[in-house]
Every structure is written in C-alpha cells, then in structure tokens.
Amino acid sequence: MGKRILVTRPYKQSANLCNLIEGQGWQAIKFPVIEIRSKALSAKECFFLQHIEQYQYVFFISVNAVNFAYEILNQDFEYLKHVKCIAVGLATYSKLVQFGITNILLPDAGFNSEGILAIPDLQDLDGQSCLIIRGVGGRKLLANTLRARGALVDYMEVYTREPVSYPRESVNLAFADGNLDVVVIYSVEALHNLVQLAVEGNKKNNLLLIPLLVISRRVYAAAKDIGFTKVVIANEATDAAMINALNNGENCGGSN
C-alpha cells in the first residue's frame, strides 16, 4: 500500500485533493478538523454590501470568501466588475474568474497578507476605500497596513470556522502508531484543532511524530512551536502543489 495521508480540510474542499492523492496510488483519509458555516451579516455589513461598487478595492481572503459572498449577492457579481478585486491565492483567483470576474490583482509570490501588501498598486492608498471579505476573525496585518497607507478599510465577514469533534475511538484509530505517513494542514487554526483532538485522545505524542505538509511559513512556524519534528511547506496552496510536495518532500517550498 502507498502513502496514507490524513486530509484535514472540510469535505467539499478536499474532494479534488483526495481524488488526486488516490490517483497516485495512495490512500486519502478524510478527517476534517474545521467546519465552514455561513454567517448572517450585521446591519453594518449589509450596508457595505449594498454599496460594494463604491469601493476601490475588494479583497477576497479565501475561496470560501468568494463562495459565500457569491451566494449573499444572489449569485451576481456584476457590481464587482467595476472595482479592483484582490485574490489571496491562485485558488481564490480561479474561483473569481469562474464567477465572471477578470479585474483581479494577485500577489507575485507569497499568497498571504504579506504577499498582497507587496502588490505595487497597494503602496499608496491615500483616501482609497477597501473592503476585506473573509471569515470571522483572522489576522489584522492586512487591514492595519492598508490603513497605515491611507486607506479606509471595512470588513465583511461571511462565514465562520467551527472545530469538529470526534469520538475518542476515532482519534485513537487515526493517530495509532504507524497508521499515517503524512498529515495535510492548511491553517494555524486547523493545526490547533487537530492537536486538541490528539490531546483529548491522549495521542499528542503520536501526532507530533507524523510528518506535516503545510501551505505557509506561518503554519510551519506554529507547527514547530508545538513540537512537530518533520514539517514540509508546499510552494502554493493549490491541489497540484500539494501533490508535488507529497512526491518531492524537502524539494518543495522548504522544510525543517
């Protein structure tokens, strides 16, 4: 049998990656640690939505941000065709294109807040208005830096991330000695939820010995702080990049 890979993304988001993993002759074990749920907008967020065409820049922090905003806007992104959209990564970019948006700015590298902030168009924002569409919570670096550059910044939070719980027996089976070859992690929040499940099942020591594949240096740093002994960073957060990392290990974006 080939590699046994634990995929921690929500079921809908992990389907393609799992198919690609199995296409390599490996085993994809679906073990979501976060559930994505839609969120009702506040009165202020509804106001932002009603005037979305008045923003100079609209930032989409994830594919989920695009999907939920699309539903909230009754599957009509027509108003967004008149503003500049910023996608945090290639998957987010592709989803916007799928929904008919072409006026998109994308980081040249570093598909995160730091990468977005390096985009040339975003260096001088005096008096410009920006809307950040994201899930509840998250980093403040992007908004704080945009404001420091003179922008007026609003948030529209369109979904929540909820931890998933499992029976202790399921956790014990997942993290039993020798049961996994790699765990795929996409966020610091998912990493913390995974570790908490292992702690509750008295399997943290087992988990820390399993190699991790992560999508960013931020997740890498969090994993090393927790005590994981083997962490590899994919070049991008795309499914193709994850498969490449699973095939090439240290020859990807970096490792310990």
Image: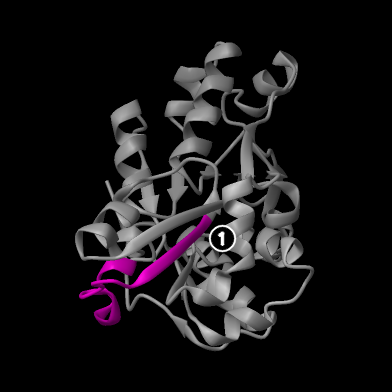
Q: Which residues are magenta?
A: 116-133
- Asked if residue 129 is among those painted magenta in the image, a careful observer would answer yes
From what the image shows, is residue 82 above or below residue 50?
below
Front residue of this view, candidates 106 and 128: 128
Residue 29 x %, y %: 70, 43
Colour scheme of the rendered structure = one colour
Q: Secondary structure at mark 1?
A: helix
Q: Which residue is mark 1?
A: 48
What amino acid type should be assigned to the residue bearing mark 1? Phe
Which residue is drawn at the image coordinates 47% and 45% (left, top)?
A: 187
Residue 37 x %, y %: 71, 43
Front residue of this view, candidates 194 and 179: 194
Q: Is residue 195 left or right of residue 173?
A: left
Which residue is drawn at the image coordinates 55% and 30% (left, top)?
A: 194
Q: Residues within 10 Å of mark 1 (few under 14, many from 20)?
A: some
Residue 225 x %, y %: 29, 30
Q: Is residue 125 visible?
A: yes
Residue 165 x %, y %: 69, 24
Q: Is residue 25 visible?
A: no
From what the image shows, is residue 196 above or below residue 73?
above
Which residue is drawn at the image coordinates 69% and 80% (left, top)?
A: 99
- Asked if residue 124 is among those painted magenta in the image, a careful observer would answer yes
Count the marks: how many? Answer: 1
From what the image shows, is residue 47 above or below residue 164?
below
Front residue of this view, candidates 251 and 50: 50
Which residue is drawn at the image coordinates 71% and 44% (left, top)?
A: 40
Residue at the right extreme of this rendering: 74
